[in-house]
């Protein structure tokens, strides 16, 4: 996302420069014609840079002296609003569902979002079905998925322990 913004800003900036330069150089109306061409070109560049930098930025947690950023803290709260019922307190796992502290060690962001959005079902050898519900239709989860990921990856990296993490105080 930020990458797209960055590219986008850059091309707008470059674009503005070239427009200004053309204005300064050209004197007659006729000679301003190139502007008509550069403008759509710039717009096109801006859009395509957004379209083609399709790679999604992976949400990162921030930790300072054992405290975490707002997003990771929010992730803690959201996780314990919905997911902990199956995945256990502090994501440590329960008899219903696996530990996500372990799962995130070898699961990437794309696989994580796919699993939570679409859900998953597995049938064990004994015939027991374990089901991870799909949360695509749950705005309380979808809106905070990045924060939940931040929290879980911080847990998985051992940066956040059990219990409620402390928030980094606002800088004055
Ligand atoms: C109703 C119980 C339940 C709830 C609620 C639930 N899960 Fe799950 N989840 C499961 C089960 C069961 C599995 C294992 C599915 C399987 O065996 O394939 C699972 C698997 C997963 C996996 C894959 C783990 C792995 O090892 O591959 C992720 C990631 C996950 N859940 C995230 C979440 C998140 C985030 C939430 C909260 C938004 C959540 N789950 C809520 C039951 C649940």
Image (cartoon, rainbow, N blue to C red):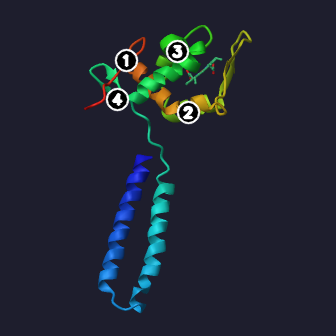
Which residue is painted at 50% across and 50% down in the image?
Answer: 54
Badge number at residue 14: none
Which residue is painted at 42% across and 26% down in the image?
Answer: 72
Q: Considering only order in the chain, which callout, 4 or 2, is on the residue closer to the N terminus?
A: 4
Asked whether the beta carbons under mark 1 and mark 2 sit within 8 Å of each other, the answer is: no
What element does badge 3 sit on? loop
In the current view of this chain or complex, which residue is farthest to the front? Answer: 172
**Image side of residue 154 versus residue 146, left or right:** left
Q: Is residue 34 above or below residue 88?
A: below
Q: Considering only order in the chain, which callout, 2 or 1, is on the residue closer to the N terminus?
A: 2
- Residue 110 drawn at (x, y percent): 53, 36
Q: Quadrant of ligand 1?
A: top right
In the current view of this chain or complex, which residue is farthest to the right? Answer: 127
Q: Does the residue labelled 3 lie within 8 Å of ligand 1?
A: yes
Badge number at residue 113: 2
Badge number at residue 62: 4
Q: Mark 3 points at which residue?
A: 99
Q: Mark 1 points at which residue?
A: 158
């Amino acid at each position: 996302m930020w990458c797209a913004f960055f590219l986008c800003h850059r091309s707008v900036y470059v674009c503005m420069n070239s427009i200004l330069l053309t204005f300064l150089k050209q004197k007659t109306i006729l000679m301003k014609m190139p502007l008509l061409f550069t403008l759509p070109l710039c717009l096109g560049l801006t859009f395509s840079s957004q379209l083609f930098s399709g790679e999604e930025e992976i949400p990162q947690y921030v930790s300072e002296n054992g405290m975490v950023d707002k997003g990771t803290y929010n992730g803690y709260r959201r996780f314990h609003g919905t997911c902990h019922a199956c995945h256990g307190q502090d994501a440590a796992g329960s008899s219903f569902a696996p530990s996500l502290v372990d799962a995130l060690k070898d699961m990437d962001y794309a696989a994580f979002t796919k699993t939570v959005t679409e859900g998953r079902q597995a049938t064990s050898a004994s015939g027991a079905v374990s089901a991870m519900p799909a949360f695509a239709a749950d705005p309380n989860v979808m809106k905070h998925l990045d924060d939940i990921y931040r929290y879980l990856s911080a847990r998985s990296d051992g940066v956040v322990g059990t219990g409620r993490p402390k928030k980094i105080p606002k800088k004055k």
